[in-house]
Amino acid sequence: MKHHVLASLLAALTAVAAIACRAGTGVSQLPPEGGDGPVTVFYPTAAPDETVQRGPFVLSLAPQAVPARGNGRLIVISHGSGGNAWVHSDLARALVGAGFVVAVPRHRGDNSLDPSDPGPDSWKLRPGEVSRAIDAVAHASQLAPLLALDRVGVYGMSAGGHTALTFAGGRWSPRSFAQHCEAHIAQDFPACVGLYASLRGDLFDGLKETVALIVIRHRFEDDAAWYSHSDPRVQAVVAAVPFAADFDPASLARPRVPLGLVLAERDQWLAPRFHGGAVLKACQPRCELLADIAAGGHGSMLSPLPPPAVLGARASALLSDPTGFDRSQMAAVNQRIAAFFRAHLLP
């Protein structure tokens, strides 16, 4: 009887200790690898969270805290155009709560501090930056001993979703991007042009479309090379509202690794039928639809969402929550993403 009581007490203490190890979400920044930007890392820690200010966001994190052992796996998040680590901090916290370490590289020329070169030129660089972010974590003295980097997950949203699809085995070309815009410039104008201009339903729309196509042809039509990237460490991928119209559909028909998709039916930036919906059509039944957010827009996956004053008028129109969208549902979506990675990365 005494031994039974002692065993129960030890089990209870072990459970308490495990909970204590997940007390907070640590955050730190790793130095750049080569010419890349820094890598923001979120991780389990026994330290309590505190209120911190990061740009326009007030977050609960434990800066520079000592890492605690989690489940031993790493997830790399590839942010969208003009993005940063903080707009994915709610997802990062959910992944850390599931025991993962999360690394977010700052993509060169396509981030909130330097949005100078979005689009195909950035898409060529991003997969290498993700692989080097894994290297950076491997070189981090406090984190590396807590991780096995033979099974890494990649999550990407928007342009980051393009990066994620590349890791799933997709191949794409700048010429395919130009051909898509030639065929669908009016129906998918924001995807082709970004924030440089918008259609307003007036007499100038035709001129805007003509000028946009001249620029796109000049920059991308002659580049017919297929771009791909392989990293055997990446063993599961989630792509959320991805830019995908420039992929060879056949390359995604049999994804190299388990592929999960998150779509938003009211996406005003990347028309789903050309992008995420087209990927789903190509890869089913060999991929998994994790969520199709009925009232969600392109910015639904940004959590926290930047305030309109930071986004600016055009980006705010494309990213702000549509009428009727219930943002509280995104906590459940984040949990589905975490469950997908648990299922495919853990023993």
Image: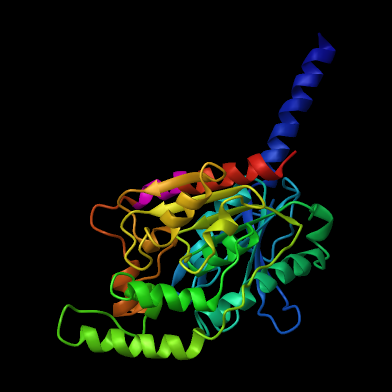
- Decide: is 152 above or below 110: above
Quadrant of the snapshot with the C terminus = top right
Report the side of 295 relative to 289 (left or right). left
Q: Position of residue 47 (x, y in %)?
A: 67, 54
Residue 153 is situated, as x and y percent measured from the top left of the image, at 66, 54
- Asked whether 329 falls inside the magenta stretch, the response is yes
Q: Residue at x 57, y 79 (%)?
A: 224
Question: Picture quarter containing residue 152?
Answer: bottom right
Q: Along the line of sight, which residue is nearer the eye, 46 or 266? A: 266
| The residue stretch that appears in magenta | 327-332
Toward which corner of the image does residue 265 lie, by quadrant? Answer: bottom left
On the picture, is 307 further left or further right than 148?
left
Asked if residue 99 lies left or right of residue 144, the reply is left
Give the number of marks: 0
Residue 186 lies in quadrant: bottom left
Seen from this angle, which residue lies furthest left?
Answer: 202
Judging depth in this view, the residue of 268 and 108 nearest the camera is 268
Q: State the colouring used for the structure image.
A: rainbow
Question: Can residue 116 be seen from the camera position used here?
Answer: no
Figure check: 135 above or below 335: below
**Residue at (77% x, 16% y) in the render:** 5
> x%, y% of residue 109?
56, 84
| Residue 332, placed above or below residue 89 | above
Q: Relative to the observer, which residue lies in front, 269 or 15?
A: 269
Look at the magenta stretch and give its main secondary structure: helix
Q: Nearer the viewer, residue 59 or 90?
A: 90
Measured as percent of width and height from the top left, residue 9 is found at: 75, 24
Residue drawn at x 58%, y 50% is 259
The reply to whether the magenta stretch includes residue 194 is no
Q: Is residue 72 visible?
A: yes
Quarter of the image for the N terminus: give it.
top right
